[in-house]
Image: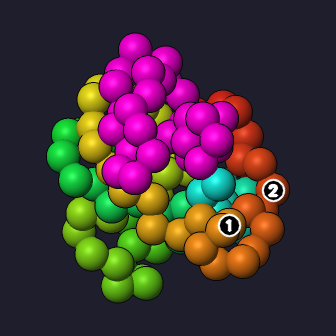
Amino acid sequence: MARIDVQGYGTYNVENGKKLVLALEDNGIDILHRCGGKARCTTCRVEVLSGDLGPIGEKEANIIETKGLSENVRLSCQVCVSSDASIKPVLTATSEGLDAGPRPDEECE
Ligand code: FES
């Protein structure tokens, strides 16, 4: 279990190996995931306030660079929770007035 503190929402116990975007959604946070977890849309991004969200894979690193996102941003659909962290969701269905998007696969790569 890891403790994930989500600024503005609360602190949640998350099973190790769970996809962060699903951990957020399953705890009632309406984070966007417009491409369904394919590392394309970046709407699932979170700001990392503290802690470690694990290594960045090639797909995630590429899209973060292409979109010019800041270094402390991670794509929650590409993160498998492995240790405690404090994060802040950037875009939500409520903040953007959009449907969240298709639910990403459960499987964490
Ligand atoms: S990049 Fe689209 S859901 Fe994560």
> Does 55 appear above or below 95?
above
Instruction: Give percent across and percent down for residue 22.
Output: 62, 39
| Quarter of the picture holding the C terminus | top right
Residue at numbered disc 2: 102
Which element type, helix, strand or loop, lies under badge 1?
Answer: helix
Instruction: Give percent across and percent down for residue 42.
Output: 54, 70
Q: Is residue 34 left or right of residue 39?
A: right
Magenta range: 1-29
| Quarter of the picture holding the N terminus | top left
Does residue 4 appear anywhere in the picture? yes
Residue at numbered disc 1: 93
Which residue appears at 46% of the width and 35% of the height?
80
CB-based contact (under 8 Å), mark 1 and mark 2: no
Which residue appears at 64% of the width and 78% of the height?
96
Instruction: Give percent across and percent down for residue 78.
Output: 50, 49
Instruction: Give percent across and percent down for residue 104.
Output: 72, 47
Q: Is residue 76 left or right of residue 107?
A: left
> Does 24 appear above or below 43?
above
Closer to the chain start, of discs 1 and 2, is 1
| Tag shown at residue 36 | none
Which residue appears at 38% of the width and 32% of the height?
11
Front one among 17 and 56: 17
Q: What residue type is labelled 1?
A: Ala
Question: CA gap, disc 1 to disc 2?
Answer: 12 Å
Which residue appears at 68% of the width and 67% of the height?
93
